[in-house]
Amino acid sequence: MTITDISASLATRRPSRARGTVYGSAATHGSSALAPAATERIQPEHAAAAPSPVRAVPAGTEARGFVLYVGLGEDAAAADHVELARLVGELRALTSRLAPSAQTHAAVALAPAGAGGRDVDVVRRALGDPAVQQPAPEAEADTGIVIDLTRKRVALGDDIAPLTYREFELLQHIVLREGTTVGRCDIIDALWDADADDRPNERTIDVHVRRLRAKLGGYAEIIRTVRGAGYRFDRHADVTVLASGPSPDRF
């Protein structure tokens, strides 16, 4: 999942789809600083403005603002006859009218086209809601997939995927070009010398990818086939890529 500023993401169409927005006020501009913050229900204008925090602010801390996660995909927004930019603009205008001293920041959460899950859950995870960072007790055994480019290994939960050297190089080549479709000829030229005895053809690359996917288990879909073009790495919320120092890629 990636995050981009609302104006940039709505001005440029990308392969990923907007799944919702986060709307924050005050100077926090993020979720990590909001854990101790109190929240209040916004009262109608005719009601008495009496503070009524849902939970008390812990001693030694002070509320600096709040964040509102809005789960609303582009298709759902279209069905509701509203644009995300307009929705964000009106929320900002409302905040400015009710609290002229408030500072605001808006961002859009993006996800690969066709990715499942509830919009609001995608937004909360993508934008770093502390409440969803820890796995549920029943899911503790599954810690996702970790692609460690430094140590040249792939961890599936507590297990290490039995990738061959060539299979890892293939995975790494596609991962390092995240968001870009990598052609079969590009893979061949990058991973095999021109005069190599085992230099494959394009059809053989499909076999290599099929074997790689089989070893990725439930995460095989992170290597997505782009019909007639090649392959693309699709990062999900439970996919972690680790790398330190310069790119470990050959090029």
Image (cartoon, rainbow, N blue to C red):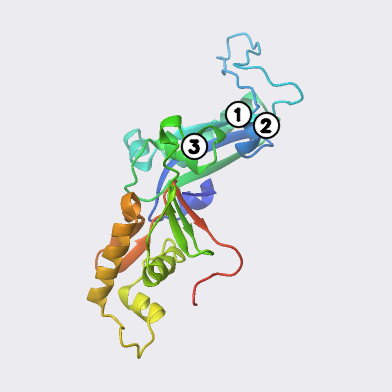
Q: Does 221 sit left or right of 91 as displayed?
A: left
**Left or right of residue 63, residue 225 in this image:** left
- Which image quarter: residue 34? top right
125 or 139, nearer to the observer: 139
What kind of residue is marked 3? Answer: Arg
Nearest to N terminus: mark 1 or mark 3: 1
**Crowd class of label 3 (few under 14; some 14 to 19; many from 20; radius 10 Å):** many
- Amino acid at circle 2: Ala
Residue at 59% across / 63% down in the picture? Answer: 244
- Relative height, residue 151 to residue 13 (above, below): below
Q: Position of residue 112 (x, y in %)?
A: 38, 51
**At which x and y percent is residue 106?**
56, 41
Alpha carbon distance from label 1 to label 2: 7 Å
Give the secondary structure at mark 1.
helix
Cα separation between marks 1 and 3: 21 Å
Position of residue 193 measured from the top left corner of the image (x, y, whole percent): 39, 86
Q: CA distance from mark 2 to mark 3?
A: 22 Å
Q: How many numbered markers are drawn?
A: 3
The residue that mark 3 highlights is 124
Q: Residue at x 32, y 55 (%)?
A: 220
Which residue has dot 1 on it?
95
Residue 98 vs 128, above or below: the answer is: above
Say which element carries label 3: helix
Q: Circles 1 and 2: CB distance less than 8 Å?
A: yes
* Location of mark 2 (residue): 102
Tag in front: 1 or 3? 3
148 displayed left or right of 199 = right
